[in-house]
Image (tube, helix red, strand yellow):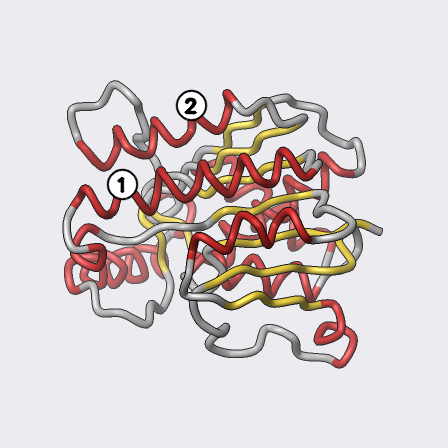
Amino acid sequence: MESALVVGCTGLVGAQIVANLLANPRVFSSVHTISRRALANSPATTSAAAAALHPYESKDTQSWAPHISSISPPPSAFFSALGTTRAAAGGFDNQYKLEHGLNIELAKAAKAAGTKIYVLISASGANKNSFVPYSRMKGEIEEDIKQLDFDHTVILQPALICGKREESRPAEALFQGLAAALGSLNQKYLKDTWAQDDVVIARAAVAAAEKLQTGQQTDKVWVLGGSEIIKLGRTEWKAQE
């Protein structure tokens, strides 16, 4: 059995990735996490899951890459849901340093350690040539990850991410409420095209890594937009439950 590593694991999607890996150990039997703080609610709901979880907690992000190098055997799959907001970071320059700088640093450490599969939670509209700073940053992260030449790279590009966040984001909460209301009327046509639930995105990420690890999928670079995320993370996931 293989192991997985998750960064950004205290965030909305990252926490769901950890929970779903632990709840479904069909491919990845152990889960390593790296974070500044402890996981809010333990994703390990059974004693077996608790034994499979290996958290590393440090506010010193400079220690994260060396920790990746120390994991033995190296994780087969690396999941990054690492991200922040401009407001939380104290400006776009700091946001870029975290999202781009730290993401690439950790990806390089994982590649050097021998990780074969890299899964990135990006964003719809990511484009390195965009005039929008956020979209340009996301696009640059995607391109720089591709340049590292993992055996397999998965890039998920969700639109609005729906879920319960710990921090307050009033504007996002307004759109999440709208998405929930429209989804109750018609999930497929009124919500899925512009909003995806955190658990669906996480399950799509896990499913993609599982398919690559088991040879069911062989893409060098696999980009998942909204419809593909829904297919993997909801339709196909439900079929195998």
- Residue 84 is left or right of residue 43, and the answer is left
Residue labelled with disc 2: 143
**In the rendered image, is residue 73 in sight?**
yes
Measured in 3D between alpha carbons, the distance from the residue under mark 1 to the one under mark 2, in whole angstroms, is 15 Å
Query: Label 2 sits on what residue type?
Result: Glu
Which is more N-terminal, label 2 or label 1? 1
x, y percent for residue 236 = 65, 46
Report helix, strand or loop for mark 1.
helix
Query: Between 90 and 118, which is closer to the camera in this rendering?
Result: 90
Q: Nearer the viewer, mark 1 or mark 2?
A: 1
Label of residue 213 in the image? none
Query: Between 126 and 142, which is closer to the camera in this rendering?
Result: 142
Q: Is residue 60 above or below residue 51?
A: above
Q: Residues within 10 Å of mark 2 (few under 14, many from 20)?
A: few
Q: Is residue 105 above or below residue 41?
A: above
Give me the residue at 70% from left, 53% from top.
Answer: 71
Q: Residues within 10 Å of mark 1 (few under 14, many from 20)?
A: many
Q: Is residue 218 above or below residue 102?
A: above
Residue labelled with disc 1: 96
x, y percent for residue 142 = 42, 29
